[in-house]
Image (cartoon, rainbow, N blue to C red):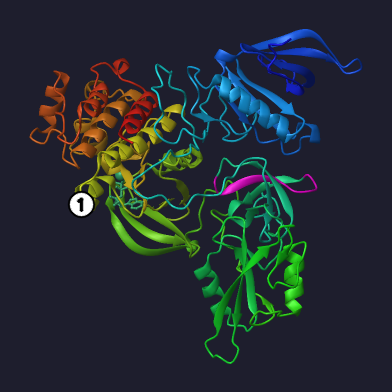
Amino acid sequence: MSDNILEEIFIKRSQQKKKTSPLNYKERIFVLTQEKIAYYDYDPDKGKRKGLKGTVDLEKIKCVETVQPEPTGPPERAYPFQIIYDEGPLYIFAKNEDVRAEWIKKLKEMVRFNKDLMQKYHPCFWVDGTWLCCQQEVKQAMGCKVLDGFTSKPSRRRGSRKPLPPTPQEEKSARPLPPQPPEQPSRFVGMTVIAEYEYTPMTPQDLELRKDEEYTILEMTDQNWWKARDKYGKEGYIPSNYVVEAGNGLERFDWYCKNMNRSQAENLLKTENKDGGFLVRDSSKAGKYTVSLFSKGGDVAGVCRHYNICTTPQGQFYLAEKHHFSSIPDLINYHQHNAAGMVSRLKYIVSNRAQPPSTAGLGYGVWEIDPRHLTFIKELGNGQFGVVKYGKWQGQHDVAIKMIKEGCMSEDDFIEEAKIMMKLRHENLVQLYGVCTKQRPIYIVTEFLSNGCLLTYLREGLKQHPTSVQLLEMCKDVSEGMAYLESKQYIHRDLAARNCLVDGHGTVKVTDFGLSRYVLDDEYTSSAGTKFPVRWSPPEVLLYCKFSSKSDIWAYGVLMWEVYTLGRLPYERLNNTEIVEQVSRGLRLYRPQLANDKVYTIMTSCWGEKADERPTFQELAFAVQDLLYELQ
Ligand code: ADP
Ligand code: MG
């Protein structure tokens, strides 16, 4: 017995190695030794260990982490953790946080030199064929959350790890350039949210929101529409921008403006222009709160004062030394009646919740957009289908609107396809928001990217000479968007820098996927046509029009070449006929000056003569990521 390192009674979830095996939870005695974890049947009456039920070899462990508890799980399952090993995840529930932390710490220590440690994991459970965190339906799908300590270059090579499927909602790894927006609070399936606004359902699938009530999030596949359950058990879709994560319990108070900073608070208070107008916001110090108060006090313009809510060592709150309160609402209530040292008492609640925001789309699953809700602001360019404009949807949301010139597109086929395209969602794909098909010309409404087309951005938009990290990041963005399309068996057919767009942070997104099938223009659709993307096409497309994910791979190699030449025309000196001839005979693009050997090796791997010699996008995404690790 002396070699037992830890021993504990846990609840173990059945592993369901076979699809038909039941999901159950049983108490087991877990014993950790130098080599393995063994778990035994347990006799609660005698408090004794019985037959051995299973073991996990420590050297097979790839990850040990906590798991988000089930939203409706019983209290005895409030402290789950996961051990991922070659047979999948093993879920164990500890009786309290201390025991769980002790086991995780010990196990992490013991497996830290294991081969194949994972860089990413799933923070939620695998249930009924789905990962609750990212909605992926493949048990082996790569994790959707980067493990702490894996955001920078790993200390050792990751060896011959087999590439795994990409994740639709993958978190970005550390990205030194260009700058990232401030970090989003973590959001996960199972979290409790509070409605900040009333929402009246627009479709039968929607769920009504009552202000200040709590809801449990069941699904977040669509960034704009989350599936939620209310306290009566009713389920449906809600606009995600109408709720906030329940955190400190202050969300239900109108005076609490969670995500507001000092200058926003001042603006709001000044606009309201009421003596004694106040709000409470998160202080710039994490975990602290500030009262912002507007006072006219004889001064016509009025002044804003900011008071930090302090805490005593006993955990009581105060604004003025003499008056301590056990909660912030109590403190606010008191100061609504007593200035107690402040410039004025808290007279009027100033709230940023007066007007509900507009929802993205007119209810869940609605893809027909009412053109009366669109405002056209300026022309962005002219494309194959006609004019593209920048505008607003419902006066608030930035959108790009393609106005399809009549006779350019086989519209009915496209409209059918648009329903499928709407469901494709990845941070490196330009999101289709909806279509207007009840009038002519029809409109295609998509996400707007402020830096426009990648080709122009490469040629003119980069303010300074790009760094190698920047160029590789662009390639990585495209490879991840494409790996997602590949996983959906969706073929792009016209991948090129001109069909990628760049957002305000420099992130590249792929657009126009699959659209070429609906073009009515022989010059574009026939491989002999002047507009056919000959320079991006592999031999099998040029010779037999055989499109596949592997022809997209070829195009990706050419796109990488465009990136590393800052937007030159591939095979500059050759015309289309010459390209068909030479490429079929083995001619390939030269190594751009900015591309080192490793980068060029990735490019050329895309130009294998035969389609099956070329890598997959998943493999490319990993290869590019590995190079990025080396650079950082
Ligand atoms: P098409 O694919 O129909 O030929 P494009 O998509 O190339 O047309 O659009 C023409 C131009 O409009 C692009 O080069 C780009 O500058 C601009 N544009 C198109 N879509 C967007 C968008 N979503 N965001 C920002 N600019 C866009
Ligand atoms: Mg295009």
- On the question of residue 139 being in view, the answer is no
Q: Nearer the viewer, residue 516 or 428?
A: 428
Q: Nearer the viewer, residue 388 or 306?
A: 306
Residue 77 in picture, x, y percent from top left? 76, 32
Farthest residue to the top: give it.
51
Q: Residue 64 sits in which quadrant? A: top right
Q: Quadrant of the C terminus?
A: top left
Indicate the amino acid at tag 1.
Glu
Task: Name above or below for residue 517 compared with residue 391.
Answer: above
Residue 33 in picture, x, y percent from top left? 66, 13
**Residue 228 colored in magenta in the image:** yes
- On the question of residue 120 being in view, the answer is yes
Q: How many marks?
A: 1
Residue 460 in picture, x, y percent from top left? 20, 52
> Disc 1 beta carbon < 8 A from ligand 1?
no
Q: Nearer the viewer, residue 91 or 542?
A: 91
**Residue 414 colored in magenta in the image:** no
Task: Name above or below for residue 544 compared with residue 308.
Answer: above
* Residue range (magenta): 223-233
Q: Quadrant of the N terminus?
A: top right
| Residue behind mark 1 | 460
Residue in the picture at 54% in, 82% down: 303
